Image: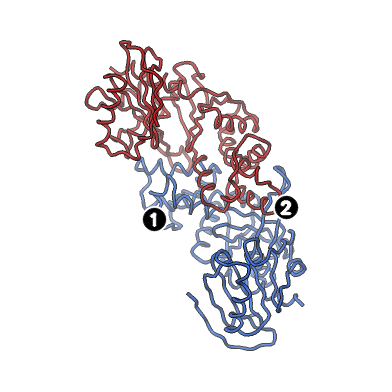
Chain colours: A red, B blue
Amino acid sequence: MAENSGTGGTGEDAFLAIDWGTTNRRVYRIEGGKVVATERDDRGVKVLAPTDYAAIIAADRRRFGDLPVLIAGMAGSTIGWCDVPYAAAPAGLPDLVANIRRMEGRIAIVPGVSIRGEGASGARADVMRGEEVQLLGAAVSGMVLPDSLLCQPGTHCKWAMMRGGKIASFTTAITGELFALLRGGSVLSAFLGSEVTPDAAFVRGVHEGARRDVAASLFSVRAASVLGDLPEADAASFCSGILLGSDVSVRLEESPGETVFILSDPALGGLYRAAIEALGGSAVLIDSHEAFVAGITAIRKLWV
Amino acid sequence: MAENSGTGGTGEDAFLAIDWGTTNRRVYRIEGGKVVATERDDRGVKVLAPTDYAAIIAADRRRFGDLPVLIAGMAGSTIGWCDVPYAAAPAGLPDLVANIRRMEGRIAIVPGVSIRGEGASGARADVMRGEEVQLLGAAVSGMVLPDSLLCQPGTHCKWAMMRGGKIASFTTAITGELFALLRGGSVLSAFLGSEVTPDAAFVRGVHEGARRDVAASLFSVRAASVLGDLPEADAASFCSGILLGSDVSVRLEESPGETVFILSDPALGGLYRAAIEALGGSAVLIDSHEAFVAGITAIRKLWV
């Protein structure tokens, strides 16, 4: 399942970057801050043993060039190649570089970022691995303001408050995973076959979700369907709206007036933008791949 | 898997009641408002076709007596024997009786209760089947106040506001199902093996849940576990506390100062009581089987 998009260029600052996730990974050859070749495959950490990594990277070098390699993401986790301790928030690019893990053979793994919990009254414990490169890349390259609210939708949606170009604090919400669980095998599964689109039913769901009574709002998907008040074509959008509306409403309440910079593909990012706008906020979409490349290039420059 | 607890008595007002759920059912022979024989089995509606019911009831009559039969629960749903339209809330015992479905051979099915939704600004759509008999039974027998807040914990937790002994309104929260989904196959599954008990970790979860940011609070179970701040023995209780705390906090906010009457078995009821008390409310436990018997006996008296 590889998609190779070119191998030109041989600049002196060339390096390989690997965004190594749980399910997939993407390899980039970067020169002068630009991607000159990239390839995606499904060798995510969950199908690999720690002993597999060296050989995979050797093969990457045969295809992309015998260059220094910078790895971000779940490869640095307990289920990856090597457990790299998190940098503590607030964290900027120098904090990531200071905590980088050097492996043999000009290979390094970028740490994730953590927040230690402080009990019920304080901050929640939270962790990220891989998203920090996008976040700091977006800030260092000027794609977002140094003080801004960033959103990375996905199975586990990350919301990061940036201050002075650093990740000051962040929150992970398992919004996407909850939808997948409900669609996969719940009392709602039979109603959630349709595609989710940012339509009127989605917006109604967003307002319902903003009541922040998720477990009850979700049952109303079934009740309204059984009573004939929610057409089957609308149920998935309404349900997704409930989950996104709940998530977004908390974040807008915590950061009133902030424009949200969404780092995402257009489809999922469009849903979050619709939810944010429905609740009176404003949002812009940022290219998340470009942000990753900017971030990993900046780390490469600091990594000596 | 039947447990038969006696067959004595032959009063003139004798009848059979069946609480027919999705997974299990319970048959009662009731005389003078007392259970003289009861039996539970796993012939819930999900394993039955509509054509199966007559023969099962005939067999029940051979064991329990050739008596009138009153059925409550999912047997009256689209996945049961016969789809019996809901009575609309507010609903009291006479409203259930007025909407009862008479089948052939002195058999009747008690309707559920519904609330039609009124869009984002109004009431949520909601439905119940079976719980109404417990709720109205608890009210008619004086187990709860005519004006009170009742809670029926379970896979789908029901919260009913009683007014003048009627079900004025109610809310279903899929709190129990969310926990089962998370335990079964989510990013949290690996942390949720322990038993849930109303301990300190549970209470911390309740306070976290009362922030009403469920999708983010749930991820903190993983983050705190990964960071070593949440012992494995505490994670399930903390997670359950988050879900119950979110559910309970909304209901206490909607009905400030109300004592909650919990109709439940002691274990699950005890968790809800602990959550309610942690958030400053007060709760008492009511025997849900006794409430069912009181309700179905009252319906039998009105059913002519």
Q: Nearer the viewer, residue A117 or A126?
A: A126
Q: Earlier in the sequence, mark 2 or mark 1?
A: 2
Residue A145 in percent (x, y) is at 51, 19
Mark 1: few, some, or many residues within 10 Å (few <14, many ≥20)?
few
Q: What is the number of callouts on the image? A: 2
Q: Is residue B248 visible?
A: no
Q: Is residue B231 above or below residue B299?
A: above
Q: Is residue A105 visible?
A: yes
Q: Which residue is mark 2?
A: B116
Looking at the image, which residue sits at the far top?
A11
Which residue shows up at 55% across the image and 24% down it? A285
Which residue shows up at 50% across the image and 78% down it? B3
Q: Nearer the viewer, residue A120 or B154?
A: B154
Residue A225 in percent (x, y) is at 66, 51
Secondary element at tag 2: loop
Which chain is mark 1 on?
B
- Cα–Cα gap, marks 2 and 1: 39 Å
Which chain is mark 2 on?
B
Query: Is residue B189 found left or right of B135 in the rendered image?
Result: left
Q: Given the image, on which type of amino acid does mark 1 rest?
A: Ser
Quarter of the image where the C terminus of chain B is located: bottom right
The mark found on residue B194 in the picture is: 1
